[in-house]
Image (spheres, rainbow, N blue to C red):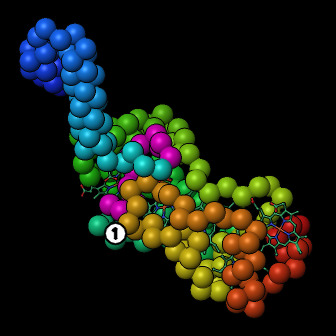
Amino acid sequence: MAVTDGGGGPGSARATGAPRRRLLIAVVSVAAALAALLLSWNVMFPYAVGERQPLPFSHQVHAAARQISCLFCHDGADRSPVAGIPEVAKCMLCHRVEITGFPPIRELRGYYERGEPIPWVRVYRLPDFVYFNHEVHLAAAVDCGRCHGDVRAMDRILSPQVIDMGFCVDCHRANGATVDCLACHR
Ligand code: HEC
Ligand code: HEC
Ligand code: HEC
Ligand code: HEC
Ligand code: HEC
């Protein structure tokens, strides 16, 4: 609001007499105010890329700056088909003491105390008629980054490529892995 007043004030003062010009200046000031608002919004909420998630969790902060291993949080990946999203209790191992006054961490504690899972929005999702398995890929030394990109550089998870049948089959061909329809469509 303060931004709109600051932008509109000097503009309308200069436009005395010419209604059209005044209108133009008003439009330009409003546009400038909106741009300023948008900019400060991005500064205040730097996570506004990728899916809108219930908490502003950053992989860059956790997996790069704090060097937490992918498998510490996604501990199904090397032993089951599903990588798994960590439970709130796992977050609380650190956030009982880390930045406890930060509003999103107070929200995190709220989920924990209510025994409620965080409703994270899924980014990667294959259709039900496709079978995928993390464990076999990790056993074959296929790195997370081959499919998920450079997650350590991401605040919000963004898929670097479309995961379609061609994506799977091309790599299988290149690596002598199976292209049998029934391996992926059971
Ligand atoms: C091994 C310790 C550890 C675990 C586990 C952990 N965090 Fe953090 N987290 C931190 C630290 C340390 C910071 C502060 C980073 C800073 O200020 O530089 C942080 C920062 C955050 C922030 C502030 C925004 C951001 O991402 O920087 C949020 C939100 C957050 N964590 C959510 C979570 C959630 C949700 C989980 C569980 C999925 C989790 N954390 C698990 C250590 C951890
Ligand atoms: C501190 C815990 C933590 C660590 C460490 C961590 N993740 Fe995550 N990861 C999460 C949480 C929580 C989500 C769900 C929220 C989101 O999508 O950001 C998630 C989501 C994801 C997703 C998207 C899943 C989907 O389909 O929605 C991928 C892919 C992923 N992580 C890969 C990685 C990789 C690769 C690493 C290591 C470089 C890693 N994660 C390290 C907690 C973690
Ligand atoms: C060969 C490609 C590939 C590799 C390598 C891979 N993923 Fe995935 N990942 C996928 C696909 C495809 C999905 C969606 C699966 C579905 O919808 O059934 C997925 C889903 C996920 C999810 C969300 C669903 C779940 O399984 O819990 C997380 C989290 C995740 N991956 C993390 C990781 C991590 C961490 C690594 C490395 C340790 C990794 N992935 C390695 C392809 C891969
Ligand atoms: C970056 C390369 C790569 C990508 C991308 C990839 N795979 Fe694989 N996949 C492999 C390798 C390597 C193996 C292991 C081959 C072996 O051990 O014989 C494998 C094995 C598998 C297996 C086990 C096959 C069996 O022998 O039973 C399935 C199922 C599978 N992949 C499904 C998928 C699906 C579905 C996708 C796409 C969402 C995909 N893969 C993407 C490299 C890849
Ligand atoms: C390595 C894994 C893999 C193999 C092998 C594979 N598919 Fe697929 N297939 C997929 C994935 C992943 C999708 C989902 C594509 C999407 O969501 O866009 C898919 C989708 C399809 C679809 C739906 C239409 C489409 O293109 O999206 C058909 C039909 C299909 N596959 C048939 C086959 C047949 C027939 C074979 C054997 C010649 C085969 N697939 C082998 C992974 C595989």
Number of numbered discs present? 1
- The structure residue drawn at horizontal position 42% and vertical position 49%, both measured from the top left corner, is 49
Question: Residue drawn at (81%, 84%), measured in percent from left and top?
Answer: 178
Residue 123 or 103: which is nearer the viewer? 123
Is 51 located above or below residue 149 in the figure?
A: above
Residue 170, image x, y percentages:
72, 80
The answer to whether residue 172 is seen in the rendering is yes
Question: Secondary structure beneath disc 1?
Answer: helix
Quadrant in which residue 12 is drawn:
top left
Q: Residue at x 75, y 91 (%)?
A: 176
The image quadrant where one finds the N terminus is top left
Q: Classify residue 179 by image quadrant.
A: bottom right
Residue 9 visible in the current orientation: no
Q: Mark 1 points at which residue?
A: 64
Amino acid type at image mark 1: Ala
Label 1 beta carbon within 8 A of ligand 2: yes
Q: Quadrant where the C terminus lies?
A: bottom right
| Ligand 5 image-quadrant field | bottom right
Judged left or right of residue 91, residue 171 is right
**Main SS, magenta residues:** loop
Of residues 161 and 55, the one nearer the viewer is 161
Residues 92 and 131: in front is 131
Span shown in magenta: 51-62
Quarter of the image where one finds residue 93: bottom left
Q: Is 151 colored magenta in this rendering?
A: no
x%, y% of residue 7? 15, 24
Question: Where is residue 3 drawn, in percent x and y?
Answer: 18, 25
Q: How crowded is mark 1: few (under 14 residues within 10 Å), some or many (20 or more)?
A: some
Please indicate whether residue 86 sits to the left or right of residue 25 in the image: right
Residue at the (39%, 45%) spot, across then down: 48
